[in-house]
Amino acid sequence: MDYVITKPELPTINGYIEVIDDSGNHVYQATQETEEKLKLQSDLAQAQLQLQQADDTAIELYEIQANQDSINAQQDDSIIAIYEKIGG
């Protein structure tokens, strides 16, 4: 239900208007422009979080691969040593 504000009770805040809610309380309501900005900020924060998670995953995969390369090199050295011992 819309109530007409005859006497504002809240201090002015850029991007918000004063409205009266269903309980008769004066409250702030974001303007459409502010709602859009808040949505963009939320979307940006979500994208940054996803990017950080992707970076973390890439680093983890790199470290796993580097560890596997080290294991493979050790196995190669062991195979060569065994081959040399048996007269290869």
Image (cartoon, rainbow, N blue to C red):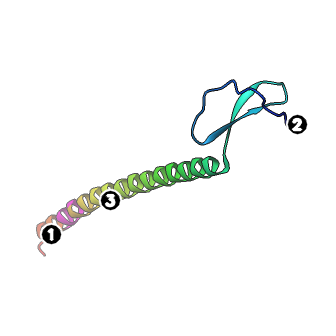
Q: Are marks 1 and 3 in contact (CB under 8 Å)?
A: no
* Circle 3: residue type: Tyr
* Circle 2: residue type: Met
Q: Which residue is mark 1?
A: 86
Q: Residues within 10 Å of mark 1 (few under 14, many from 20)?
A: few
| SS at mark 1 in the image | loop
Relative vertical location of residue 82 with respect to residue 24 in this rendering, above or below: below
Start-end of magenta stretch: 74-79
Question: Rounded to the nearest whole Å, what is the CA distance between mark 1 and mark 3?
Answer: 36 Å
Q: Residues within 10 Å of mark 3 (few under 14, many from 20)?
A: few
- Residue 20, how many percent across, how many down? 78, 30
Q: Is residue 27 left or right of residue 71?
A: right
Q: Is residue 48 magenta?
A: no
Prevailing SS of the magenta stretch: helix
Question: Rounded to the nearest whole Å, what is the CA distance between mark 2 and mark 3?
Answer: 58 Å
Q: Disc 1 or disc 2, which is closer to the eye?
A: 2
Q: Are marks 1 and 2 in contact (CB under 8 Å)?
A: no
Q: Residue furthest front?
A: 6
Relative vertical location of residue 52 with respect to residue 69 in this rendering, above or below: above
Q: Which residue is mark 2?
A: 1
Q: Is residue 63 left or right of residue 18?
A: left
Q: Are marks 2 and 3 in contact (CB under 8 Å)?
A: no
Q: Is residue 69 left or right of residue 55?
A: left
* Circle 1: residue type: Ile
